[in-house]
Image: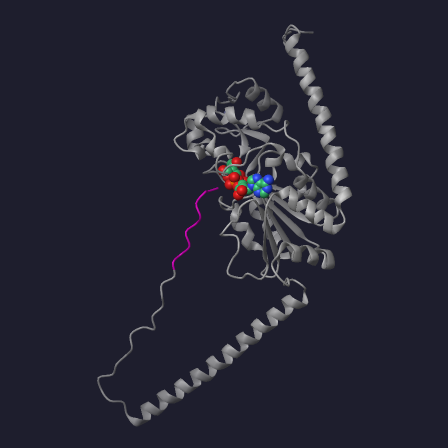
Amino acid sequence: MSEKETPGTSKKQGEDGPRNQSKHSESLVDAQATSERLESIRTNLNSLFSRLTLHAASDNLLAQQSGQVLEDLTFESFLKHWKDNGFKRIITMVGAGISTSSGIPDFRSPGSGLYDNLQKYNLPHPTDIFELDYFMGNPKPFFTLAKELYPGHYIPSPAHYFIRLLNDKNLLTRHYTQNIDCLERLAGIPEEKLVEAHGTFHTNHCVDCNKFYTKEWLKEKIFGDILPVCEECNGIVKPDIVFFGENMPDHFYTKPLEDFADCDLLIIMGTSLEVYPFASLVANVKPNCIRVLINRVAIDKFSGPDKKRDITFLGDCDDAVWQMADVLGWTNELKDLWKRESSLFEQARKKSDTNADQEAKSPRISKKNSR
Ligand code: OAD
Ligand code: ZN
């Protein structure tokens, strides 16, 4: 993946080409032939333009007939449209903003974002923490951060459960996430509906020989402050998180081909759309597919010149999902799901904290020596 936008090829302003200027005066016959040819070209062009205009008009009509063009591009108008007409094939695309209410910082928010808070690691550049070349030379900063961010401590947000509800109601085609916090899995979005574009802590491999290591194996090393080293070849074992300079998982390239052509609503939440190729997915839907961006700050590059179907909700993801749930009559369902699941996580968390406390107070017995 890359933080830089692929530079577009600059189009040269076309020239008609040099005119052939005959040094000799044309004969009358030649002049007539030329004028006939010009007339024929003009007729063809007229016919082509009128066909193009007809196509544009009928495309517009089709879009209106299929109910895809909103009366106005407000969130309220979008909600009304959803309530009145429904959507059948929804894709969600998210970033760190859907997890900030769970207590995980995002990356680029000034002040609170992770990249503004990595001073203790003395990195030449904040994003180096996820740079493969840097990691190979100095893996410690990443593993120290991984201990802080390791999945298990945080509870999914209402926004995560809203996406789970979409799936429970058979409306979710796929959920594309840049997040590595595993909160989608915890919220019960099934694995086959997930594209974890920037990878996951769920699986791990040796960077040299590619030997697989389990989540439990790596977690023990990370929490024991031990550099995870491959038992086969001494290479570093890294969670399957996609670093800058690495390829995305295969299904990031294959699933969009199945998903985007049919999608009738694209919901984009909590992302700056700064990182490519993930950000480029927003362009994959059909021109009449409604796209809704829910984010605390406006993202200039989101809306293209075609302003017929792009809506921006400026605010928190959780506020937006409660508003959507309200209009769709799902408030109680979302509340029940979120509260029920959150209290289960709280209980499990308290239990594991108590166990950890007891373990710390009791004299340590080495597992190796106990029988
Ligand atoms: P960013 O930090 O770049 O963007 C998060 C966006 O979410 C910002 O525009 C915030 O304003 C917005 N935001 C924060 N909290 C919000 C909330 N509660 N409701 C609504 N909006 C909120 O994070 P990403 O776009 O996810 O790579 O960053 C993309 C990638 O860059 C990450 O996957 C990461 C990083 O390098 C890896 O982890 C490998
Ligand atoms: Zn190895």
Task: Name the residue rendered at 50%, 28% in the picture.
Answer: 209
Q: Which corner quadrant of the image does residue 19 belong to?
A: bottom left
Question: Is any atom of residue 242 visible in this view?
Answer: no
x and y percentages locating residue 160 in the rendered image: 66, 40
Q: Is residue 357 shown left or right of residue 273?
A: right
159 or 331: nearer the eye? 331
Secondary structure that dominates the magenta span: loop
61 or 214: nearer the eye? 61
Q: Is residue 309 above or below residue 95?
A: below
Taking the magenta stretch, the answer to whether it contains residue 20 is no
Task: Please state the total of marks drawn on the protein image.
Answer: 0
**The C terminus lies in quadrant:** top right
Q: Which corner quadrant of the image does residue 18 belong to?
A: bottom left
Residue farthest along the bottom direction in this orientation:
28
Taking the magenta stretch, the answer to whether it contains residue 3 is yes
Q: Is residue 315 above or below residue 9?
A: above
Display colour scheme = one colour
In magenta, the rendered stretch is 1-10
Question: Is any atom of residue 121 visible in this view?
Answer: yes
x and y percentages locating residue 266 in the rendered image: 62, 52
Q: Is residue 239 above or below residue 290?
A: above
x and y percentages locating residue 164 in the rendered image: 70, 42
Task: Name the residue rendered at 47%, 84% in the picture.
Answer: 43
Q: Which corner quadrant of the image does residue 21 belong to?
A: bottom left
Task: Name the residue rendered at 63%, 71% in the picture.
Answer: 61
x and y percentages locating residue 255 in the rendered image: 60, 48
